[in-house]
Image (cartoon, coloured by chain):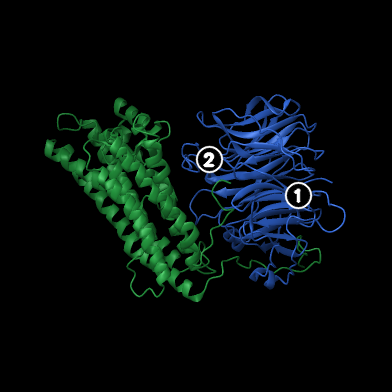
Chain colours: A green, B blue
Amino acid sequence: MRLPSVFLLAGLALACLTPALADTTPAQAALQKRLVGTILAETILPDHAALVQATADQQRTMRAACATPSADTLSDAQAAFRDLVTAFSRVEMYRFGPGREDNRLARLNFWPDRRGLGMRQVRRILQEQDQTATDPATLRGKSVAVQGLSALEQVLAEADGGMIPDFACRYGTAIADVTHETAEALLNGWRDGQAGLLRRPGPENPLYRDQGEALKTLLKAAMEQLIIVEQQKLGRVLRDGPASANPLSAPFRLSGMTLRAVAVNIAASRAVLTHPDMPDLDNPDLLNLFRELDFELGQSEAAIRTALDFPGGIAARIANPATHDLLQYARIPLQAAVDLHDTRLLPALGLVRGFNALDGD
Amino acid sequence: MHSMATDRRSVLLGLFCTALPLGQAIAGAPAPPAFLTTGRRDGRFHAMALDGAGHILGDVPLPGRGHGFAVSRDGHHAVAFARRPGRFALPFSPATMQASAPLPLPADRHFYGHGLFSADGKRLFATQNDFDAGRGVLAVHDVRQDYRRIGEFATHGIGPHECLLADDGRSAVIANGGILTHPDWPRRKLNLDTMVSTLVRLDLASGDLLARASLPPALYQLSMRHLAATPDGATWFCCQHQGAATEQPPLIGRWDRNGEIRLIDLPATVTRSMRNYAGSIAATPDGRRIAVTSPRGGIIVVLDGRSGSFLETVSLADTCGIAPTGDGFMATAGTGEILLGGKADAYPDINWDNHMVTLKS
């Protein structure tokens, strides 16, 4: 016998599990479905495939740099690493689903390294020449901080006289192997699982009840990345001025990829959030909104790319007042984009931003 | 004035709605405050006192977003805590809603949103983050000396969240959520690959660790965060899962007086609907009913407090705050809705926050 609800003094029986979903018009639901499909087909799946290719290139170039050490093979491995950082920066925002499983995103790149923990662990492996770190099978069992891009960056920085020392080279190759395995697992997870879950929501879908939930998941990932870029990757590095700037907290500082990676992060979020050239979009207000968002993010990306024209690494660039100002400026359109998303884009797409469902509360 | 609540759920459930005057008690003698909760109105955050019918009796402006409360046993004193990683805790009188000076806080600590008064009301304890050391602490404040901070105890874990005065009146039960955070990276989880969540019981006079419980290693990414006590000496807890969304482990459990800890199995459709996120938990004073809110799922799950068996779910979008009313519960939602006594009312200009407490009359 069904017990009366504890919320009902009158003892009315409650229907079970009525989904508490946002009211969405049929046109909005159709648009949500179309956007999810577009983002998957044009951004997420190709970007993850590109990551697999970049890790394969890194494997090949690392092996060549170890087998025939020379300035040329080292240069190839370093160039492959820069391409790998670029490819990773396109998918870095997807910290859910296949990215969360087996801690794959953290395995690909351990960041933020709050207290230099990962750097210390990598240094210890290099100093002690821990042979178990040169076998991908045993490296996978170690801390995620020593098996991803930040570790490989440190290994490549060991190069001296156009060569990577033997042990570091074998360790770096094992990192490249693990990274490739992880990237393949990530792509398979998206292609064979997560993409279908996002495309086909419904009562039997374990993750998404409707297309709105699916779309909101993707928009949230893109927005969180913009907030992380604005507050952490730029804000924490720039601080109040060149005198107090903190280049040591910049990701990919050793390879000189900090700002390129940040620009790619923004471009990746832009690809998810804005669709200014969407054909047959019979909604001029939404189209204008996409264009506004696209303009803001484009401004930010352009400012960062202009800052790249200044010579030197991140430390030199933020020590220069003009570049520092330029990068501070790049934060403003990001803030505007976050505001546009929260106040206008979500309602226009028939989505509601929850007040009470933030992580860790 | 707030509007009639005519959402789809209410209609489906046959609930009826009435319009209640905002900020005004029922005609006649002012009702005593029955509940405390926090919310956002006009972009500002408040602690609010509600009467037994859900009318707002008064409020205390907060400097930022609030979270939970500590209330003295006699009901004369309350403290509203900032949502993590906030830095305020504001004492006030529930009867007058007059605030006094905020609690002092060292520069290298922040609050986690919860606290408790000692049985005699002379001490206030608050969960805090010693973020440079990456460890949780329970701060000790002397109520009679304007809440002067007189010490702290280790919580023997990371990320302590809700804490309760145990039934012996001399110890506290604390949920160490296990998630490492740092204010330099707001709301970023820094240790998901290695996190460990525990429940601990501390002696409130000495800080001694009296008992500790954790879940099986396979559930290491299940973060125990919120608590409710029942008269049989058990502590009920609810969790947020930080692992893969497809894993969907149980989110509700019970820690018995004899030290046994167990998770409660729910029907698969209910677990799935909770979206790996429980936001708050409450027990009726007799311990016969347990209610857990899931804002992401938009549902409230009700259990039998003696057997642990599942009784029902109630739909309420973005719900989180829940508190016992006697033999039932009152629930609030980020949408402004209040569910009480078979009626769903809405304050559309208010976003009710995560937690609510019942004041003893």
Question: What distance separates the C-alpha of mark 1 from that of mark 2?
Answer: 30 Å
Give the chain letter at badge 1.
Answer: B
Q: Residues within 10 Å of mark 2 (few under 14, many from 20)?
A: many
> In the rendered image of this protein, does residue A113 appear above or below residue A274?
above
Q: Is A21 in front, or is A60?
A: A21
Rendered image quadrant of residue B162: top right
Circle 1 SS class: strand
Q: Tell me the quarter of the image containing the N terminus of chain A.
A: bottom right
Residue marked by disc 1: B35
Residue displayed at 35% across by 54% down: A297
Q: Position of residue A133 (x, y in %)?
A: 32, 35
Give the chain letter at badge 2.
Answer: B
Residue displayed at 36% across by 32% down: A245
User: Which is in the foreground here, disc 1 or disc 2?
Assistant: 1
Horizontal side, residue B46 vs residue B27: left or right: left
Residue sitting at the far right: B29
Type of amino acid at the residue the image marks with label 2: Ile
Residue displayed at 45% across by 58% down: A341
Q: Position of residue A5 (x, y in %)?
A: 75, 63
Circle 2 SS class: loop
Residue marked by disc 2: B179
Q: Is A222 in front, or is B178?
A: A222
